[in-house]
Image (tube, rainbow, N blue to C red):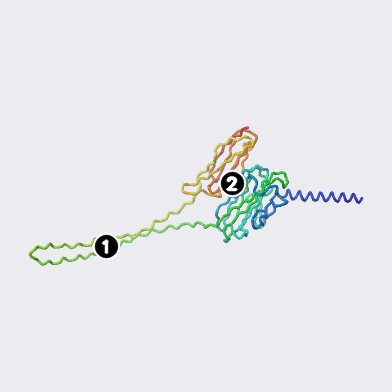
Amino acid sequence: MRNYFKIVTCFAFVLCTMGVYTSAVFSYSSGPPFGRTGSPADNFKTCNDTGCHNSFVLNSGSAKFSISAPSSYILGETLSVTVSFSNSNTLKHGFELSALDANNKYAGTFNTVDNQTQTSSDGNYIEHTSAGSSQSGNASWNTKWTAPSSEVQNPVTFYAAGNEANGDGSRDGDYIYTITKQVSIGTATPTPTPTASTTPTILPTATLTPTPTASVTPTPTPTTSVTPTLPPTATPIPTSSPTPMPTPTGCENESILASPGELVLKSGEDGEVKVTLIPIEGCLPEEGEVVTAKINKSDRKRISISPRSATTDVNGEAFFVITAKNKTGNAKVKFRYENLKDTVKVKVIK
């Protein structure tokens, strides 16, 4: 009886231990513990620590992990910040993001835009949810960051850690990445005030007094009478009128271009598409603009697109990856920015 009790007790302990281990392994699919971005405030900790996803050296994978955000901000402004993977083909992905000023103090707060992300209670961190981790291939997460309402020590640095997971439900065989991006405080552009035009002031014409002719005493040799030379009349000098400065107009994007316009892909093959927002003449490309991609329901058996939305970089460009599935035939991907649209045709072959 005593031995039986020992066996039951041991078995219960093993089950309990396995339950704790399994819980620790699978809980990260719904987001890692806050404080794993690799920032100084986190003591540079990531999920690559001992006992976690440490099969490989940090940043040793072949994927590209990146943060897309504007290069400057205004106090209290809300910006779009996107964290993404490219050149990846694993089944699961995750991330965690924070922002610190130059004194390594938390700066601003994060907010969610969909069910793909979640924030800490104080808004200092944002990370993936279970839904957000279920992105295969290239993955991306869109977030909102509200800048501090009062000035902080420049610059603000975004710190992100990403997990490129194989999806086997364990902590083994996954790659961990880190990346940073800096933004600096800018100034709001004031509305220019037109300069009033000034009426020129005309100087009065000077009154000239002629010099009288001198009397000449006759001599045996005739002397020619000298005609006095009068000074010229002064020309009025107008006061210069300042030229009013024109009020600058807002820069807008006038067209969208997706290239290449056509792709031929074999089943399982990927193709990259670059979408460029073209501004009106005289304007620079806009960074941080959101471009969306859509596939018709009937074409989803042939192709997939990742990410579903991406933000433009400093060149006004956003990048997407189209993956061909097993069903052959023709399909289309529609890219959109506000009221601008462009389409890429895709032919899937064996």
Q: Is the residue 308 above or below the residue 204 in the image?
A: above
Secondary structure beneath label 1: loop
Does any portion of residue 117 appear in the rendered image? no
The residue that disc 2 covers is 310
Q: Earlier in the sequence, mark 2 or mark 1?
A: 1
Does any portion of residue 254 appear in the rendered image? yes
Q: Nearer the viewer, residue 97 or 198?
A: 97
Q: Nearer the viewer, residue 52 or 345?
A: 52
The answer to whether the residue labelled 2 contacts the one labelled 1, judged by CB atoms less than 8 Å apart, is no
2 or 1: mark nearer the eye: 2
Q: In the rendered view of the protein, which quadrant contains the C terminus? A: top right
Q: Nearer the viewer, residue 142 or 162?
A: 162
Q: Residue furthest left?
A: 220
The residue sitting at 72% across, 52% down in the picture is 50
Q: Residue 342 location, x and y as percent?
A: 54, 41
Res. 198 image quadrant: bottom left
Q: Residue 165 location, x and y as percent?
A: 68, 45
Determine which of the numbered discs, if any, sits on residue 205 in the image.
Answer: 1
Q: Residue 76 location, x and y as percent?
A: 57, 58
Q: Amino acid at mark 2?
A: Ala
Give neighbour class at mark 1: few <14, some 14-19, many 20+ (Cα, 10 Å): few
Q: Residue furthest top?
A: 350
The residue sitting at 59% across, 57% down in the picture is 156
Give the Cα separation between the discs numbered 2 and 1.
71 Å
Secondary structure beneath label 2: strand
- The answer to whether 165 appears left or right of 212 in the picture is right
Q: Residue 155 location, x and y as percent?
A: 57, 57
Q: Is the residue 266 above or below the residue 179 in the image?
A: above
- The answer to whether 341 appears left or right of 112 in the picture is left
Q: Amino acid at mark 1?
A: Thr
Give neighbour class at mark 2: few <14, some 14-19, many 20+ (Cα, 10 Å): many
